[in-house]
Image: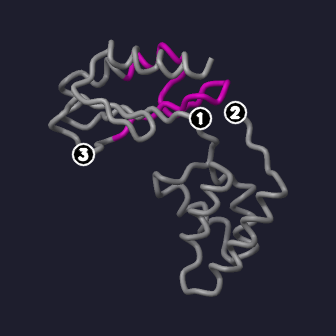
Amino acid sequence: MKFVLEESKVQLLKERIQKHKQKPGPLMPTLHDAQNIFGCIPIEVQKIISEELDESVAKINGVVTFYSNFSTEPKGKHIVSVCMGTACYVKGAKAILDTISDMLNIEPGQTTKDGLFTLENTRCIGACGLAPVFQIGDKVYGNATKDTAKQAIEEILKSEA
Protein backbone atom coordinates (compact mmCIF):
# COMPACT_ATOMS: atom_id res chain seq x y z
CA MET A 1 0.00 0.00 0.00
CA LYS A 2 1.52 3.30 -1.07
CA PHE A 3 1.02 6.55 0.81
CA VAL A 4 -0.44 9.47 -1.16
CA LEU A 5 -0.21 12.99 0.24
CA GLU A 6 -3.55 14.65 -0.59
CA GLU A 7 -3.64 18.45 -0.54
CA SER A 8 -7.09 18.59 1.09
CA LYS A 9 -5.78 16.51 3.99
CA VAL A 10 -2.67 18.69 4.28
CA GLN A 11 -4.92 21.76 4.55
CA LEU A 12 -7.04 20.10 7.22
CA LEU A 13 -3.92 19.21 9.22
CA LYS A 14 -2.59 22.77 8.95
CA GLU A 15 -5.92 24.13 10.22
CA ARG A 16 -5.80 21.77 13.20
CA ILE A 17 -2.18 22.71 13.92
CA GLN A 18 -3.13 26.39 14.08
CA LYS A 19 -5.72 25.55 16.76
CA HIS A 20 -3.24 23.42 18.71
CA LYS A 21 -0.63 26.20 18.63
CA GLN A 22 -2.97 28.33 20.75
CA LYS A 23 -2.33 26.00 23.72
CA PRO A 24 0.82 24.66 25.39
CA GLY A 25 2.19 21.34 24.09
CA PRO A 26 0.79 21.24 20.55
CA LEU A 27 2.88 18.27 19.30
CA MET A 28 0.91 15.31 20.70
CA PRO A 29 -2.55 16.58 19.67
CA THR A 30 -1.11 17.40 16.24
CA LEU A 31 0.29 13.88 15.87
CA HIS A 32 -3.04 12.34 16.89
CA ASP A 33 -4.79 14.49 14.29
CA ALA A 34 -2.22 13.57 11.64
CA GLN A 35 -2.67 9.85 12.37
CA ASN A 36 -6.46 10.22 12.09
CA ILE A 37 -6.36 12.35 8.94
CA PHE A 38 -3.75 10.38 6.97
CA GLY A 39 -3.96 6.95 8.62
CA CYS A 40 -0.20 7.14 9.27
CA ILE A 41 2.54 9.72 9.83
CA PRO A 42 5.25 9.16 7.21
CA ILE A 43 8.23 11.46 6.84
CA GLU A 44 6.36 13.69 4.35
CA VAL A 45 3.75 14.48 7.01
CA GLN A 46 6.41 14.82 9.72
CA LYS A 47 8.12 17.51 7.62
CA ILE A 48 4.87 19.49 7.36
CA ILE A 49 4.40 19.26 11.13
CA SER A 50 8.04 20.27 11.63
CA GLU A 51 7.59 23.42 9.56
CA GLU A 52 4.26 24.37 11.12
CA LEU A 53 5.37 23.83 14.75
CA ASP A 54 8.99 24.93 14.26
CA GLU A 55 10.25 21.64 15.72
CA SER A 56 12.97 19.40 14.30
CA VAL A 57 11.97 16.44 12.15
CA ALA A 58 14.25 14.33 14.39
CA LYS A 59 12.21 15.21 17.49
CA ILE A 60 8.92 14.54 15.70
CA ASN A 61 10.18 11.25 14.27
CA GLY A 62 11.39 10.21 17.72
CA VAL A 63 7.92 10.70 19.16
CA VAL A 64 6.18 9.03 16.21
CA THR A 65 8.40 5.94 16.36
CA PHE A 66 8.30 5.71 20.17
CA TYR A 67 4.53 5.45 20.60
CA SER A 68 2.91 2.33 19.19
CA ASN A 69 -0.38 4.07 18.37
CA PHE A 70 1.42 6.10 15.69
CA SER A 71 2.47 4.47 12.44
CA THR A 72 4.80 5.61 9.67
CA GLU A 73 3.26 3.18 7.18
CA PRO A 74 -0.33 2.98 5.94
CA LYS A 75 -2.33 0.32 7.75
CA GLY A 76 -5.01 -1.95 6.40
CA LYS A 77 -8.74 -1.53 6.80
CA HIS A 78 -8.73 -4.38 9.33
CA ILE A 79 -5.97 -4.47 11.95
CA VAL A 80 -5.39 -8.02 13.19
CA SER A 81 -3.43 -8.12 16.46
CA VAL A 82 -2.33 -11.41 17.99
CA CYS A 83 -1.34 -11.20 21.64
CA MET A 84 2.10 -12.72 22.23
CA GLY A 85 2.21 -12.00 25.97
CA THR A 86 3.31 -14.85 28.22
CA ALA A 87 -0.15 -16.32 28.94
CA CYS A 88 -1.19 -16.20 25.29
CA TYR A 89 2.13 -17.47 23.99
CA VAL A 90 2.12 -20.45 26.36
CA LYS A 91 -1.43 -21.33 25.30
CA GLY A 92 -0.68 -21.34 21.55
CA ALA A 93 -0.74 -17.79 20.23
CA LYS A 94 2.22 -18.48 17.92
CA ALA A 95 0.18 -21.08 16.01
CA ILE A 96 -2.66 -18.56 15.65
CA LEU A 97 -0.24 -15.90 14.41
CA ASP A 98 1.27 -18.36 11.92
CA THR A 99 -2.18 -19.41 10.67
CA ILE A 100 -3.26 -15.82 10.04
CA SER A 101 0.12 -14.98 8.48
CA ASP A 102 -0.23 -17.93 6.08
CA MET A 103 -3.83 -17.08 5.20
CA LEU A 104 -3.03 -13.45 4.41
CA ASN A 105 0.42 -14.16 2.97
CA ILE A 106 2.02 -11.43 5.10
CA GLU A 107 4.32 -11.30 8.11
CA PRO A 108 3.62 -9.37 11.32
CA GLY A 109 4.08 -5.66 10.67
CA GLN A 110 2.97 -5.96 7.05
CA THR A 111 -0.19 -4.99 5.19
CA THR A 112 -1.82 -7.00 2.42
CA LYS A 113 -1.38 -5.58 -1.07
CA ASP A 114 -5.11 -4.88 -1.34
CA GLY A 115 -4.95 -2.80 1.87
CA LEU A 116 -7.54 -4.94 3.64
CA PHE A 117 -5.44 -6.35 6.49
CA THR A 118 -2.47 -5.37 8.64
CA LEU A 119 -1.08 -8.11 10.86
CA GLU A 120 0.53 -7.19 14.18
CA ASN A 121 1.84 -9.10 17.13
CA THR A 122 1.28 -7.33 20.43
CA ARG A 123 2.80 -7.84 23.86
CA CYS A 124 -0.38 -7.93 25.94
CA ILE A 125 -3.92 -6.67 25.50
CA GLY A 126 -4.93 -7.27 29.11
CA ALA A 127 -7.15 -10.30 28.58
CA CYS A 128 -4.86 -12.96 30.04
CA GLY A 129 -7.75 -14.92 31.52
CA LEU A 130 -9.02 -15.50 27.98
CA ALA A 131 -5.65 -16.61 26.56
CA PRO A 132 -4.84 -17.08 23.78
CA VAL A 133 -6.35 -13.90 22.40
CA PHE A 134 -6.37 -12.04 19.09
CA GLN A 135 -8.18 -8.90 18.09
CA ILE A 136 -9.58 -7.60 14.82
CA GLY A 137 -10.47 -3.95 15.09
CA ASP A 138 -12.34 -3.60 18.38
CA LYS A 139 -13.48 -7.24 18.57
CA VAL A 140 -11.52 -9.52 20.90
CA TYR A 141 -11.46 -13.26 20.29
CA GLY A 142 -10.73 -15.12 23.54
CA ASN A 143 -9.84 -18.78 24.09
CA ALA A 144 -8.89 -18.65 20.44
CA THR A 145 -7.74 -21.48 18.22
CA LYS A 146 -6.34 -21.71 14.70
CA ASP A 147 -9.91 -22.51 13.56
CA THR A 148 -11.29 -19.41 15.31
CA ALA A 149 -8.71 -17.32 13.51
CA LYS A 150 -9.44 -18.92 10.11
CA GLN A 151 -13.18 -18.39 10.57
CA ALA A 152 -12.77 -14.72 11.59
CA ILE A 153 -10.57 -13.93 8.58
CA GLU A 154 -12.86 -15.84 6.20
CA GLU A 155 -15.91 -13.90 7.47
CA ILE A 156 -14.20 -10.60 6.76
CA LEU A 157 -13.05 -11.75 3.33
CA LYS A 158 -16.63 -12.81 2.53
CA SER A 159 -18.07 -9.48 3.69
CA GLU A 160 -15.48 -7.56 1.63
CA ALA A 161 -16.12 -9.54 -1.57
Residue where numbered disc 3 is placed: 126
Q: Is 82 covered by the magenta stretch?
A: no
Label 2 close to label 1 by CB (< 8 Å): yes
Q: Which quarter of the image is occupied by the C terminus?
A: top right
Per the rendered image, the range of residues in magenta is 97-122
Residue 111 percent across, percent down from the top left: 59, 30
The relative height of residue 117 versus residue 56 in the rendered view (above or below) is above
Residue where numbered disc 2 is placed: 1
Q: Is 111 covered by the magenta stretch?
A: yes
80 relative position to 140: left or right: right
Residue 161: give its label: none
| Label 2, residues with CA under 10 Å away: few <14, some 14-19, many ≥20 | some
Residue where numbered disc 1 is placed: 76
| Label 3, residues with CA under 10 Å away: few <14, some 14-19, many ≥20 | few
* Amino acid on which disc 1 is placed: Gly
Residue 80 figure quarter:
top left
The kind of secondary structure element at disc 3 is: loop
* Amino acid on which disc 3 is placed: Gly
